[in-house]
Image (cartoon, grey):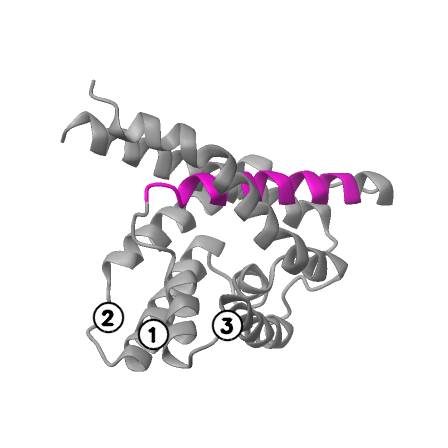
Amino acid sequence: MNMRKVVKLIVFIFGICIFTFGVSITLKSDIGSGSWDGINFGLNKTVGMSVGFWINVNSFIILLITALINKEIPKFISFITAFIIGSFMDFWLYVLGSFTVNDIVIRYGVFFLGVLITCFGIGIYLLPKFPPNPIDYLMVSIKEKYNLKIIQAKIGIDIFCLLGAFIVGGPIGVGTILSTLLVGPGVNLFYDLFSGVYNKLAIRKI
């Protein structure tokens, strides 16, 4: 493996490590999680097994649904990304353990810190353009299949995930709405901010 690929892999893993830490922090704020995360956390609470396990199971289902939409063989390479994300989620939830915050002001502070870290991490992990998380792959497929704008496809998936999270008892609340509004713009901000630095690293001859 040449150094260019090493740099891409390091940036990819680092980004996932950071953004899963951010998601774990937002969960600990106890004011709501993202819609997709709500399903995985809800299943963890009501059925059992780890959050990472449910990320893997639901990602596999999403890959099958996406393959049906695109009428193609499932791109199981995207499952590798989901597996890494699930593994880091379980790790951070284990590290944070029983950490809780009672003061409402501090809880919102923790939440916004978690969202900021999440946006930073996602913006970084997208830079190498490795296979996307299956839920992101589904969003792009729906956009192209039905000639929608990316925001329309995202809203449709968010509504579906919110319903699923509600059914399985996921942590839905004010934070869910805030995450929906803030994460997209935040990811774009960090992606644009660091893309120049990343491109210099990726093309640099070492």
Magenta stretch, residue numbers: 108-128
- Residue drawn 30% across and 58% down? 79
On the rendered structure, is 16 left or right of 177? left
Q: Quick check: marks 1 and 2 in contact, CB under 8 Å?
A: yes
For label 3, the residue is 153
- Residue drawn 76% across and 60% down? 174
Kindly indicate the quadrant of the structure image that contains residue 144.
bottom left
For label 1, the residue is 66
For label 2, the residue is 74
Q: Is residue 57 magenta?
A: no
Q: Is residue 26 above or below residue 178?
A: above
**N-terminal-most mark, 2 or 3:** 2
Q: Which mark is residue 37?
A: none
Residue 35 in percent (x, y) is at 59, 64
Q: Is residue 56 above or below residue 186?
A: below
Q: Is residue 126 magenta?
A: yes
Q: Is residue 184 above or below residue 6?
A: below
Residue type for callout 3 = Ala
- Residue drawn 72% across and 51% down? 30
Residue type for callout 2 = Pro
- Residue drawn 44% across and 62% down? 54
On the rendered structure, is 7 left or right of 152? left
**N-terminal-most mark, 1 or 2:** 1
* Quadrant of the snapshot with the C terminus: top left
The mark closer to the camera, 3 or 1, is: 3
The mark closer to the camera, 2 or 3, is: 3
As measured in the structure, the alpha-carbon distance from the residue carrying label 1 to the one carrying label 2 is 7 Å
Residue type for callout 1 = Thr
Kindly indicate the quadrant of the structure image that contains residue 67.
bottom left
